[in-house]
Image (cartoon, grey):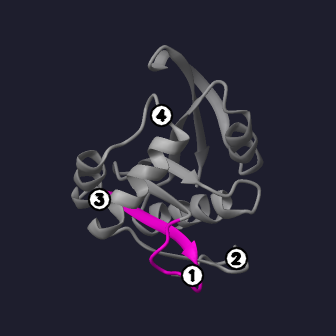
Amino acid sequence: MRVPGCEVPGVALRRFTPEDAEQVALIEYDLFPDDFWDIPMLLSEITHPDRWYVVAHPVDEPGRAIGYAGLMMGGDICDVQNITTTEPGKGIGTLLLNALHNEARARGAERMMLEVRIDNLRAQAVYRRHGYEQIAVRRGYYHGVDALIFSRDL
């Protein structure tokens, strides 16, 4: 799957399949041990008709996930459900985010929304760089840690 205007050398995207759930759940557990998405939750998400998920992988290892992202459709507003990479700083998060933007636009969305932990400064910087603005705070959203709500027009 190509993302116009955004490429990361050696990295490709493909649709998230049920076969990816175990590997992605392990990534989730490693990165977010207090708030990870388990296999049943991931399977429920990727099979939901209003969701769209992709996996980032090395070009020469299509079976090895190094990131993933998901989108919840909601008419003219879509929500980033999750976006994660095991290799921060390489542009994979941007690749995934742009893939979500493209899919949301293709489905007629005009706005994107997302929540990010208040202590996840790296992710906040990426979102701001891509035109997101903080519009609200959700107190205690992540097991007692506040979430910032971001939004941007597509």
Residue marked by disc 2: 7
Q: Is residue 50 above or below residue 12?
A: above
Residue displayed at 68% across by 35% down: 133
Residue marked by disc 4: 33
Name the secondary structure under disc 4: loop
3D distance between C-alphas at marks 2 and 1: 8 Å
104 left or right, relative to 94: left
Name the secondary structure under disc 3: helix
Q: Which of the marked residues, 2 or 1, is nearer the chain's N terminus?
A: 1
Range of magenta residues = 51-65
Residue displayed at 37% across by 42% down: 37
Residue type for callout 1: Arg
Q: Which of the marked residues, 4 or 3, is nearer the chain's N terminus?
A: 4
Q: Is residue 50 magenta?
A: no
Can residue 138 be seen at all in this image of the molecule? no
Label 1 Cα crowd, 10 Å radius (few <14 / some 14-19 / many 20+): few
Q: Which of the marked residues, 2 or 4, is nearer the chain's N terminus?
A: 2
Q: Which of the marked residues, 3 or 1, is nearer the chain's N terminus?
A: 1
Residue type for callout 3: Ile
111 left or right, relative to 134: left
Residue type for callout 4: Pro
Q: Which of the marked residues, 4 or 1, is nearer the chain's N terminus?
A: 1
Label 2 Cα crowd, 10 Å radius (few <14 / some 14-19 / many 20+): some
3D distance between C-alphas at marks 4 and 3: 21 Å
Disc 2 to disc 4: CB gap under 8 Å:
no
Q: Is residue 53 magenta?
A: yes
3D distance between C-alphas at marks 2 and 3: 24 Å
Mark 4 or 1: the one toward you? 4
Is 77 or 55 nearer to us in this picture?
55
Residue marked by disc 3: 46
